[in-house]
Image (spheres, helix red, strand yellow):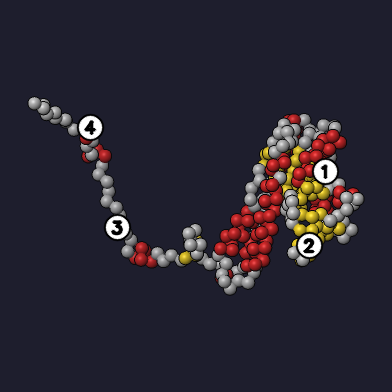
Amino acid sequence: MIVKEHKPPDIIFKLEALLKRLSKYYNGGHEIEIQLAKYRAGYNGEMSLAYYLKQLPVKEYVIIHDLRLCHQSTCFQIDTVILHKNFILILEVKNISGDIYIDTTYNQMTRTLNGTTEVFPDPILQSSNQRKNLERWLMGNKCPAIPIENLVVFTNPNTYIKNSPQDQSVFRRLVRSPKLLFYIQDYSKSYQTPIFTPKQLSKWSNFLVKNHSPKSYDVLKQFNVSQTEILTGVYCVHCQQVSTYDLTPLIKTPPSPPDKPAPLSSRKHNSLLPHTHKRIP
């Protein structure tokens, strides 16, 4: 059962709106386009999991997408949380193409695509930190102690994972989306002791959603955009241009009000008029 659906993050709409109104004198437009593409890819990757997650028994599993919780001064975001009466599973979803290698020694992930190599944070370490944060959050809210597992799910079929299967630190925490259900099935076999009753499972899933704290994005501050670099006016969806409308003529000479319709009481309906019938010889 899904208690919190996937929705596009607000940052996508804000970046789309910002790109439409950037002045030609702003030099950081390309970086904004790159960040927008990353957010779109992340959202599309999470959406692609729906096919597999829908195959889970709805009476046994509760699914929460895009959950952000705060504990004391720390906030953390989880792509997907799956609750079962015996365990909780955290999913960190990655929609990345290219050749991927995860270095757990230096806690980094490298991606090589079209001859260019980029460095990203270690997603397995990121997922493990999310698990620890969720454990502290649940403990702080007096939740019964329950096992929590974490996985990194790669959804892009064009991802080539270069780590050796012998690398157990990666092998145990990294999975492609088609194999996700097998991992979940293994967890359900490993954890046989019920922690939640059905009522508690519903209670804690609703409590998690109730405490969801969406992140607020100030895209102007994030990309150092000043007000003078924003085009004002009305955006036309047809020509995709921003125009500034001058309403001065209407203010100086307002249009005449329309004629008032006649009162209903003075109107005569044809059905109320007397009818005369002519006899046809």
From the top left corner, tell me how far across and down residue 239 is, in percent: 48, 62
- Name the mark on residue 256: 3
Asked whether the beta carbons under mark 3 and mark 1 sit within 8 Å of each other, the answer is: no
Indicate the quadrant where residue 161 lies: bottom right
The residue pinned by badge 1 equals 149
Q: Mark 4 packing: few (<14 Cα in 10 Å), some, or many (20+)?
A: few
Q: Earlier in the sequence, mark 2 or mark 3?
A: 2
How far, Cα to Cα, is label 4 from label 2?
Answer: 82 Å
Q: Nearer the viewer, residue 220 or 114?
A: 114
How far, Cα to Cα, is label 4 from label 1?
Answer: 77 Å
Residue type, mark 1 in image: Glu
Residue type, mark 4 in image: Ser
Q: Nearer the viewer, mark 1 or mark 2?
A: 2
Q: Is residue 230 above or below residue 259?
A: below
Element at badge 1? strand
Element at badge 4? helix
Q: Residue at x 80, y 39 (%)?
A: 182
The residue pinned by badge 4 equals 271
The residue pinned by badge 2 equals 112
